[in-house]
Amino acid sequence: MATPTFNNFDSEKKRVLEDKEDASRKGSIDAPVIELVKYINKQEDYYTTSSCSGRIIVFSENTQTGKEGTLWLLTSHETVSIDNVLSILKDRDIPISCYTYYKFEPFVLHVSCRTLEHAQAILRIAVSSGFKNSGISVSKKNKMILSVRSTQTLQSPVAFDGKLIVTEQYLCHLVKISNEKLEDNFQRIERFYKLVREVCIPTEPPPPIKPNCLNNSHSLLKVQEKKKERVDDDTSNHDYLESIDQLFH
């Protein structure tokens, strides 16, 4: 059986990378993943289509209009303080009938791949790096998009009509947990970037990535040690990888 291949890969990659307009609300690549995105885009068989390094957000959403009435109160790609969050919740004028949510969103990356084999190679890396919710989608034209993502999302309503509906102690726990998740998120990105460099053929010596904006140093596993270790201690993860192989071979 022939391997699925996206025939217009090269022309589509050129078009996407030459498009200077960033469609995200922020309008630019997040600083913690700039080197990772640049490195992938330099590879012959891959290019990125969207990314987010992970963030902590506070937003209000109208119960009737939904996302159309969303008011963004805080967006941070670094850890936040309880004082900052409380100040935002208490000092901003929130429209009536709006719930305010505190949310942590983990790293997400979408990569277009030339063939299914190329997508599978990065999928294995993503899963072994801790992004166990990753997967591959294939369009009718055989366009293969690898989604790198995890299950670390955290969300909780914290206010309604501009008034807190939780205690400050509860908010403190939310801030603490989300900050810990963000630090762990950056460590996973670091592992992922290291393993990607081992699989992809570099066009030039890749620069080290420093995704942790908190200036915490995280040691990377040696290549030799990584090869000797199991991909994951979780047997369900092992079964997942086997099922992927059976599905596409």
Image (cartoon, grey):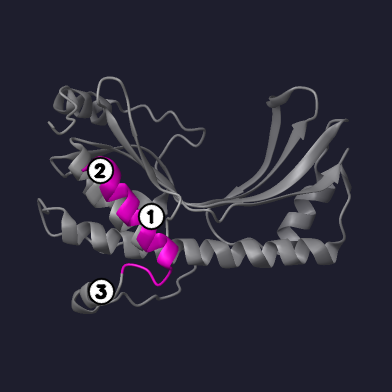
Amino acid on which disc 1 is placed:
Tyr
Image quarter (top left, top right, bottom left or bottom right) of the C terminus:
top left
Gap between marks 2 and 3 measured at Cα: 21 Å
Q: Position of residue 220 (x, y in %)?
A: 31, 74
SS for dot 2: helix
- Nearer the N terminus, badge 3 or badge 1? 3
Chief SS of the magenta region: helix
| Camera-nearest label, 2 or 1 | 1
In what quadrant of the picture does the N terminus appear?
top left
Q: Number of labelled discs?
A: 3
Measuring 70% from the left and 31% from the top, which residue is drawn there? Answer: 70
The numbered dot on residue 119 is 2
Q: Residue at x 86, y 41 (%)?
A: 160
- Circles 2 and 1 in contact, beta carbons < 8 Å: no
Residue 189 at least partly seen: no
> Which amino acid type corresponds to the residue marked 2 in the rendered image?
Ala
How far is mark 3 from mark 1, CA to CA? Answer: 19 Å
In depth, the one of 242 and 161 nearer the eye is: 242
Give the residues drawn in magenta, as a range. Answer: 231-249
User: Residue visible at 24% across and 38% down?
Assistant: 47
**SS at mark 3 in the image:** helix
Of mark 2 and mark 3, the one earlier in the sequence is 2
**Where's residue 135, x and y in %?**
38, 43
* The disc label shown at residue 226, or none: 3
Is residue 51 inside the magenta stretch? no
Indicate which disc residue 240 carries: 1
